[in-house]
Image: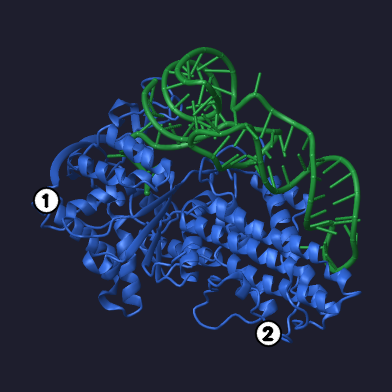
Chain colours: A blue, B green
Amino acid sequence: MSTPKKRVLVTSALPYINGIKHLGNLVGSMLTADVFARFQRARGRETLFVCATDEHGSTTELAAMEAGQDVVTFCAEQHAAQADICRRFGLSWDYFGRSSNTPNHKLTQHFARQLWNAGHLELRTTKQVYSNTDKRFLSDRYVIGTCPHCGYPNARGDQCENCTRVLDPADLINPRSAISDSSDLEIRDSTHLFLKQSQFVPQLREWIAGKKDWPVLVTSIANKWLDEGLHDRGITRDVEWGVPVPDDIGGGQLKGKVFYVWFDAPIEYIGATWEWAEVNGKGDAWKSWWFGDDAKDVTYFQFMGKDNIPFHTVGFPVTIMGSGEPWKLVDRLKGFNYINYYGGKFSTSHKRGVFMDTALEILPADYWRYYLIANAPEGSDSNFTWDHFASVVNKDLADVLGNFVNRITRFCVARFDGRVPGEGEYGAEEQALIEELDMRVRTYAEHFEAVEFRKAAAELRAIWVAGNEYLTRAAPWTTIKTDRARAAAAVRLGLNLVHVFAHLTWPIMPAIARTIHESIQPVAAGTGVIPWPEGSMADELDQLEAGQPISAPEVLFAKITDEQIAAWIERFGGPE
RNA sequence: GGCAGCGUAGCUCAGUGGUAGAGCAGGGGAAUCAUAAUCCCUUGGUCGGGGGUUCAAAUCCCUCCGCUGCUACCA
């Protein structure tokens, strides 16, 4: 298959600043984006992978208040914490930015100005709840009161969680502030900018219709919004923490207001690229990834959970289309369903499920990376249980991959002095394996190119299994008794296989891949990328020099025990 | 309530018109290099229920049931 030398731009949905993400958030955006970006780099394509924390909005202000911090300090600390945990998960972005940084401010104001000048924004005055005690406007969800439909006393202003009916804060009986519990509320007029999304329906529909390779999940959600009729959307808010609306937009009627977090957050994909260029002294290079003819050779991939799909198929595209400028739209949008935890939702407040920090407390990142990629919720929601997790880790990682590396390297150390044996020639058995792997490696790459993670992981596993099958057929522990050269050839092939496995495994399990590689030979210094084996398997499996020393690595994957499973169910929650 | 996705072997999931599949779990065997790890063979499903279209339906249509999510001011 030819390898187009195009640039690849990868973004993952921005994690919200408030709180450590759980495994579902991780697999649905950041992790799959990382594996994809690593694959592209491994194939030698110029790749830019950016992400950032999404920091604005009233939720952040209130979380900071609760933490007893000012919002700037709160966000700085939270950003540092997320950056650290993501780095420890092996997420390899070229830059991890912040939506509160200057580039995003400039870009958000630029896009708004373009939209305003083109007549796609208009001023509308809305009625909103103002809390005199809190001295702020309250978003609907921060007004609580008695539900007019079912009498539930703690219904939120956007929806009653008891009867699930959609509400307006004005409907609530005895409304009060969720922040202070004060009932000293009033309705005030507030003027806001509205984005006239409804004008873009035909353009959006045509754009979506051209995306034949997007998941059904994505196009069906997008079409549903278009079919129901797009509402014009308010893109400003009466809060303090956000990108300020500049004076030249809105005729001076929007003093003190900021843009809505969902308006500025996706713009931060561009902002993060700008931040990357600034930090690396690349000047205007960021523009070549996003703007005009310079970005013609860029293929842009987005990764996100299904909750983010409307904002990326409708909201952000309208911003770009409406700007009248040639900014890049997403080429390939990969959306994911959710991972459930024993059939229910992951929940911070109920201490149910596994979060990025607690996951790393109990096992290394690569265990999680493999499990999550092999079970990515692509077709439908998937379900996490400790028993399932343990069976995948123990079987696929410990028994199939770990044991293969262990058995061949230990045998080489015991019977061939820990050196790659040069005797013997590859025969029919080896040729059959080479042909099988030529096919399987091609298939594995095709699954990645098609952004199909479960299938890719299943093919990788099948490649590991092929190694064990070969070794059992070749049985060097038997042939060595009568034909040392024959056994030597089998060991040489087995060691070459270990080397190839390291290269194939790197996008999914970068740390383990490096360990495996270094048991055979040092990884070439440089970028840290362990490149894809682009050659024919006949060549790739004849790479190691005769006589070169190897070592048997320590146990690569510790098996998960029943006692551990029981302890983790106790700690994180289990079947109810 | 409306809408969307999903419902396939005990479990996790492929399969979108042409004789039901994979991995794990279960059963039998081989091997002994290896973390008792591996390899081979194998049991197991009226594809959520019902109706329809078709020479042919897991696949298309209708209807019912169930699960999950979204429903625009949570992000």
**Number of marks in picture:** 2
Rendered location of residue A520, percent (x, y): 69, 78
Q: In this view, does A195 lie above or below A74?
A: above
Classify mark 1: residues with Cα within 10 Å, few (<14), some (14-19) or many (20+).
some
Badge 2 marks a residue whose secondary structure is loop
Q: Quadrant of the C terminus of chain A?
A: top right
Q: On the image, numbered disc 2 is attached to which residue?
A: A545
Q: Which of A289 and A31 is in front in this view?
A: A289
Q: Relative to residue A28, is residue B9 drawn left or right?
A: right
Identify the amino acid type marked 2: Glu
Q: Is residue A232 positioned above or below A488 on the image?
A: above
Q: Which chain carries label 1?
A: A
- Mark 1–mark 2 CB contact (< 8 Å): no
Residue for point 80% across, 62% down: A472
Res B10 quadrant in image = top right
Q: Can residue A153 be seen in this view?
A: yes
Disc number placed over residue A250 in the picture, else none: 1
Label 1 to label 2: alpha-carbon separation: 71 Å
x then y, percent, for residue A154: 43, 30
Whichever of labels 1 and 2 marks the residue nearer the N terminus, that label is 1
Q: Which residue is at the front of the view, A285 or A342?
A: A285
Q: Is residue B42 left or right of residue A393?
A: right
Depicted A149 relative to depicted A521: above or below: above
The answer to whether dots 1 and 2 both sit on one chain is yes
Q: Quadrant of residue A532?
A: bottom right
